[in-house]
Amino acid sequence: MVDETEHATRCGFVALIGAPNVGKSTLANALVGSKVSIITPKAQTTRALVRGIALEAAAQLIFVDTPGIFTPRRRLDRAMVGTAWGSTQDADVVALVIDARRGVAPDDDVILRELSEIHAPKVLVLNKIDLVEKPELLTLTQALNERADFVATFMVCALSGDGIGDLKRWLAAYVPPGPWLYPEDQVSVAPLRQFAAELTREKLYLRLHQELPYQSTVETDVWKELKDGSVRIEQTIYVERESQRKIVLGAGGQVIKAIGAAARADIAAAIEQPVHLFLFVKVREGWGDDPERYREMSLEFPKE
């Protein structure tokens, strides 16, 4: 019988959970060292689980970026929150991310109350520490550790990278011994079609996050490798009303052209190939109640 401690390598899943807009996606990107999650000012930008892979010493760390946990009001909300909590079931470590500048908000309160139901080891990650004075950070750290059983606490600034190395080194030593699950050069588990759709959704929200309601999504319909080494990609942006379609198109199609140009550049950089991107905008009323749309987003369709 082989003793697991004899393994030269370690491997583990780290679920990043927290309220909306605490910086989980920025943190995931910083930990991986590459863009695996989209980032916008819009709350609940992350909808499905995003898995990014990082190497630290002899350990492979699979970071699971999750949708923000909040009080759900719609079917899509329930699907996202359920997905976020579900990510903790198979995690080797669960990292609760708190916006240190904001402190403990109502959504954080809900999460803290539920943490006792999670059996995996839990760590506390205070993000955005550059915006908070040290005495306030220490007070917040003490208060949070009194409310949950954290095995460690880390203070980071995901945007600048401050504290990221300490967190990665600790996780690398903490995850269980075992073989790596993915190739050494792989940084994401997401299919390229899905990742490309997410990049376009990011540009859509960055351009129109004030004007465009949350209920919009992007799907990749065509991905064709061309003989010259480039890729033809066709995507559809789904909105719920004709008025929203007009907003996305813009006067003379200028808005959709700008979104397409920004998305094309990011997709090409991600796949390291020239990209021909064609965007279409369609109205699909009530798409938030369409099971097929949930399958496209890798979400489980919640029953009423």
Image (cartoon, rainbow, N blue to C red):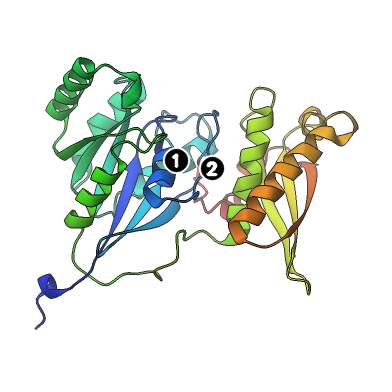
Query: Residue at left 67%, top 51%?
Result: 219
Q: Amino acid at mark 1?
A: Ser
Query: Residue at left 61%, top 40%?
Result: 202
Q: Which mark is residue 25?
A: 1
Q: Position of residue 22 (x, y in %)?
A: 39, 30
Q: List the single residue furthest toward the right.
A: 252
Number of numbered tags placed on the structure image: 2
- Is residue 242 something that shows in the picture? yes
> How far separated are the C-alphas under marks 2 and 1?
7 Å
Q: Secondary structure at mark 2?
A: loop
Q: In the shown orientation, is residue 271 left or right of residue 126? A: right
Q: Position of residue 227 (x, y in %)?
A: 78, 75
Q: In the shown orientation, is residue 33 left or right of residue 178? A: right
Quarter-of-image position of residue 42: top right
Q: Position of residue 250 (x, y in %)?
A: 83, 30
The residue nearer to you, when weighing 260 against 162, is: 162
Q: Secondary structure at mark 1?
A: helix
Work out whether mark 2 precedes mark 1 in sequence or the reverse, and give the earlier one: 1
Query: Residue at left 68%, top 37%?
Result: 204
* Residue 97 in the image: above or below residue 58: above
The residue nearer to you, when weighing 3 against 296, is: 3
Quarter-of-image position of residue 259: top right
Asked if the residue at tag 1 contacts the one at tag 2, i.e. Cβ–Cβ closer than 8 Å, the answer is yes
Residue highlighted by disc 2: 38
Within 10 Å of disc 2 (Cα), the crowding (few <14, some 14-19, many 20+) is some
Image quadrant in which the N terminus is located? bottom left
Q: Amino acid at mark 2?
A: Ile
The residue nearer to you, when weighing 128 against 15, is: 128
